[in-house]
Amino acid sequence: MAHTDKGKYFKKHDQSIEVDEDLKNEIIEQAKNKGISCKKAEEIAGELGCSLEETGRTIDILNIKITKCQLGLFGYGETKKIVQPSKEVTQEVKEKITSSLKDGNLSCATVWKIALELNIPRMKVCADCEALEIKVKPCQLGAF
């Protein structure tokens, strides 16, 4: 999304896309100050049995900002991101990350998968990516 389109999230999608009414209503109910946290979006998707992609698309169509990325990458006010590079990356994590790269990037979904497999926090995997200078994208909710 271009900088000039910031705050016009709906422009990323075909305006003829129909959204699930229950999903739409739940997002509207849970949004605060024209924003909704990544965690809350994940919870809504789980409760309603929707994919994160569909949930993110609906959030965009409603022109609601996604905040407080669970990986620490965006949505934290003036500082924007809170994740910091790890001081040390274990060989196991490094191998998992590097073997999962697509076009030199690691997807948000893959970060979640690695964290689950290794029983470590998602933000730790992202901090390791920062240390390895690997970008985490795309976002499962479609942010960025």
Image: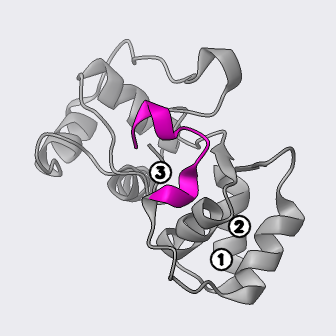
Residue 79 against residue 106 in the figure, above or below? above
Image location (x, y in percent) of residue 1:
40, 44
Indicate the amino acid at tag 3. Answer: Asn
Magenta-colored span: 1-11
Residue 120 against residue 94 in the figure, above or below? below
Distance from disc 1 to disc 2, alpha carbons, whole Å, reads: 5 Å
Q: Nearer the viewer, residue 73 or 58?
A: 58
Q: Which dot marks residue 43? A: 2
Disc 3: which residue: 119
Label 3 SS: loop
Indicate the amino acid at tag 1. Answer: Gly
Quadrant of residue 68 in the image?
top right
Image location (x, y in percent) of residue 62:
68, 64
Residue at the (86%, 44%) spot, across then down = 33
| Disc 3 and disc 1 in contact, CB within 8 angstroms | no
Label 2 SS: helix
